[in-house]
Image (cartoon, grey):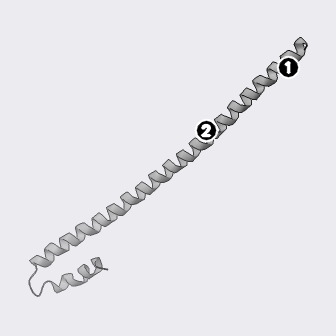
């Protein structure tokens, strides 16, 4: 084998190594992109839960106040609270 052929062979071997490294890195990058998308989706889902919790908490607080008002209301006064309370029960 000539020096030229040996050099070509060595270069081909190195190119194959680099090609394999490139493919491995691309696979890792795709995996990381998928993980990042999943993390983003998880964060978005978590935010949706927090938004729902906040909405339910507000409704709960309002309903709790109406319960206090209902308990404190006299026989005639509670009729005014009836529709508000029924809205919470829907």
The residue located at (11%, 77%) in the rendering is 71
The residue located at (15%, 83%) in the rendering is 78
Residue 72 at what x, y percent from top left? 9, 76
Q: Give the class, few, some or many, for how many residues have Cα within 10 Å of label 1's Cα (few <14, many ≥20).
A: few
Q: Which residue is mark 2?
A: 28
Examine the rendered structure and indicate whether residue 89 appears above or below residue 28.
Answer: below
**Which circle, 2 or 1, is nearer the viewer?**
1
Q: Which residue is mark 1?
A: 8
User: Which residue ends up furthest to the front in the rendered image?
Assistant: 1
The residue located at (71%, 32%) in the rendering is 20
The quarter in which the N terminus is drawn is top right
Label 2: element kind: helix
Residue in the foreground of this view, choosing between 38 and 90: 38
Residue in the foreground of this view, choosing between 33 and 44: 33
Residue 90 at what x, y percent from top left? 32, 80
Q: How many marks?
A: 2
């Amino acid at each position: 084998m000539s020096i030229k052929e040996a050099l070509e062979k060595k270069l081909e071997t190195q190119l194959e190594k680099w090609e394999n490294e490139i493919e491995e890195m691309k696979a890792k990058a795709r995996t990381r992109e998928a993980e990042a998308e999943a993390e983003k989706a998880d964060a978005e889902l978590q935010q949706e839960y927090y938004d729902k919790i906040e909405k339910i908490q507000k409704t709960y607080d309002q309903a709790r106040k109406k319960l206090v008002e209902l308990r404190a209301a006299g026989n005639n006064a509670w009729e005014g609270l009836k529709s508000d309370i029924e809205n919470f029960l829907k």
